[in-house]
Amino acid sequence: MSLGVFIVLASILSFVSAERVDLSGRGLKKEEFFIKYQSHIVMADVTELILRQNEFDSFLDCSTNLASLKILDLSQNHLQRFFFLCKDEYNLQVLNVSHNKLEYIDDKALSDKVPKLQILDLSFNKLPIVNETMLEHLKILEFLSLANNPIGEGIHENAFWPLTALKHLDLRNVSAPYFSAGLFKTLMNLSTLDLSWNPISMIPLLPINLEELDISGTQIYELNGIYLPRLRELKMNRMPNLTNLALNDLENLTNLEILSLSGCQKLVQFTVWPHHGPLLSRLQRLSIEHCALETLESDLRSIVQRTAVINLRDNPWKCDCRMQWLNANNSTRELSRQIKCYLPDRHRNKLLHEIPSYDLQCEHMSSVFYPILWTCISLVILAMVLLGVFFVVRKQGGKWTVRRRNRDTVTYTNVVESSNDLVRILTVSENHERNDE
């Protein structure tokens, strides 16, 4: 055996175990694998085949023996198509074809020949559509990722209906402006759903058994009416339209343990309205970093005190009297150690816990309030002057004098009511009386 052949075989064997073959990152084309490498591998015994980061442009099962194969990784190649045609049924459970150039999934790719598939990763391809036949045979599929495909409005409403066993669905960044009302209606076992980085402005109807939901980077600005009683984790990071959040909007998330609002740069208000009964009683982790919050109202005291881990860093905090309560007791004083003041200027870059409570003062009247106040005062004074003039005129008997051009003047006195309800108007001529003759 020549030294060159020996080195090739040693290299192959170093990546091969009895059941696992790893040929990732070797720049292989499909011809090299099917013709050259297969001759040194008993493919019928292989349960895990890793061909990641090579140069495959297609993959056809007829060129190899995949009788025992359970895991196939073809990610980071140049795949435009793949097929499972030449065996009645495969034991394949995991298929990773992410980071390829797939523009369409043929009906013969994910056919009834791979009914045992449980994990399917189609992310980072060029898929424009997900129709009703593409996934119809995957009855026991539990994990599906379609993330980072230019799908847009191309998901048919019944595309996911056959996937009744699905537990994890990743639709991150598929350019969907909306998700149809019935899209998830059969996914009663779905526990994790990622809708992040899609230009949706409303939360669609969701499976009630969800435990993890990610809507980060969406155009959603309010959460009214969301009802997910089993939800444990909610991610709302870097949402450009979220300006305020009242935790009362999450009152139906009774099992929520983790709430993340990091990077919401327009979030200026985070509060709680008066409410009855417990609110987010299971919350353990709260992150509101890199937002636009200036203050924390004392209404949040009960939630803050019982939440084990809170991250409030990198907000433009205004350290005034409204923040005094954070320094008031041990349960919140530790939290004040991570609040770095931005306003007022005299406290800038100080930590809240370093500032004595008497120095946390509020400006009760802002510069905007004064012009409004003086305008109101001026209007009141003007109204009082006009009322004064009116009463003075009435006090003088209500007489009004009109001067004619010929210097005659006529004075009209008040109307005098007679006993017979007739009205008599007395006219007195002061100059040049006229005779009735």
Image: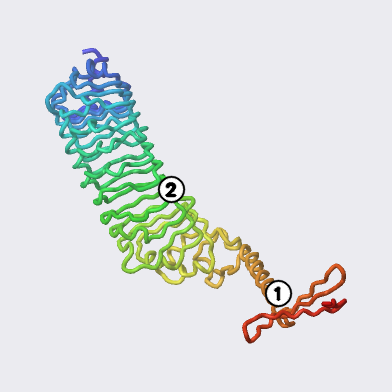
Q: Position of residue 414 (x, y in %)?
A: 71, 80
Residue pushed farthest left? 88
Provide the secondary structure element on which disc 2 rests: loop
The correct choice, above or below, for 169 with respect to 77 in the image is: below
- Residue sitting farthest toward the bottom: 419
Location of residue 350 in the rendering, given as x and y in whole percent from the top left corner: 54, 61
Above or below, 35 against 381 in this view is above
Scheme by which the image is coloured: rainbow
Residue 77 visible within the image: yes
Foreground disc of the pair 1, 2: 1
> Where residue 239 is drawn, which disc sits there?
2
In the depicted view, which residue is nearer to us: 234 or 373? 373
Give the camera-side residue of 7 and 196.
196
Among the 4 quarters of the image, the one containing residue 406: bottom right
On residue 205, which mark appears? none
Q: Position of residue 302 (x, y in %)?
A: 37, 68
Q: Which residue is mark 1?
A: 385
Q: Residues within 10 Å of mark 1 (few under 14, many from 20)?
A: few
